[in-house]
Image (tube, rainbow, N blue to C red):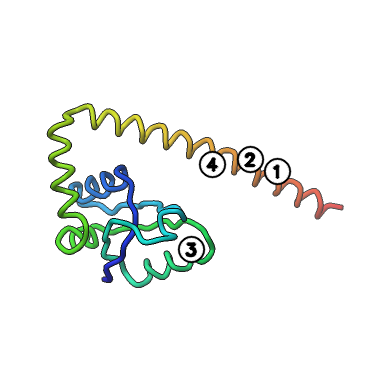
Amino acid sequence: MIRTIVTLSESQIQKIKNAYEKKTSVTIFLSYDKIKQSGKHTLLLTKSQINKIDNNRALKKGVILKLKYEQLKTNRTGGFLPIHFAALGALGALAGGSAAIANAVKTSQHQSAEEVEMKRHNREMEKLAEKAKNWSRS
């Protein structure tokens, strides 16, 4: 694995931390703005993940990365996670349950926005499919 500098949001860091604690994989989306320049977080990524980032950066698109639990374990010892795990633990102790509530609300709002966008996209695709179907009948 290769050290790679990226920019992660606090919610992405929390998502990675939760996946590590649950011993599961995690999928994160890095927008073009987060990959177009050097960030402040170090991740250990595979060569194919780095190639995916580089290709999408050239296309000015964001990228979806799936980090397996084994990769999270490696990141915990050699990447950015040790610092962030300690910092998040301290913040969680200070903030108590309010941080969890705020995160749940933020996640819910984000999922709602994603759902609205997905429905809009699906309607557009259905319209295009219908037009193509009608055009082929002509």
Residue positioned 83% across, 52% down in the render: 137
Residue placed farthest to the right in the image?
Answer: 138
Mark 4 touches mark 2? (CB < 8 Å): no
Q: Is residue 81 above or below residue 123?
A: below
Mark 1 touches mark 3? (CB < 8 Å): no
Residue positioned 24% across, 62% down in the render: 71
Residue positioned 28% across, 54% down in the render: 25
The amino acid type of the residue labelled 3 equals Asn
Cα distance in 3D space between marks 2 and 1? 6 Å
The amino acid type of the residue labelled 4 equals Met
The amino acid type of the residue labelled 1 equals Lys
Question: What residue is pinned by disc 1?
Answer: 127
Is residue 59 shown left or right of residue 103? right
Is residue 29 shown left or right of residue 127? left
In this orientation, which residue lies closer to the viewer: 37 or 51? Answer: 37
First of labels 4, 2 by sequence position = 4
Disc number at residue 56?
A: 3
Question: What residue is pinned by disc 2?
Answer: 123
Camera-near label (3 vs 4) is 3
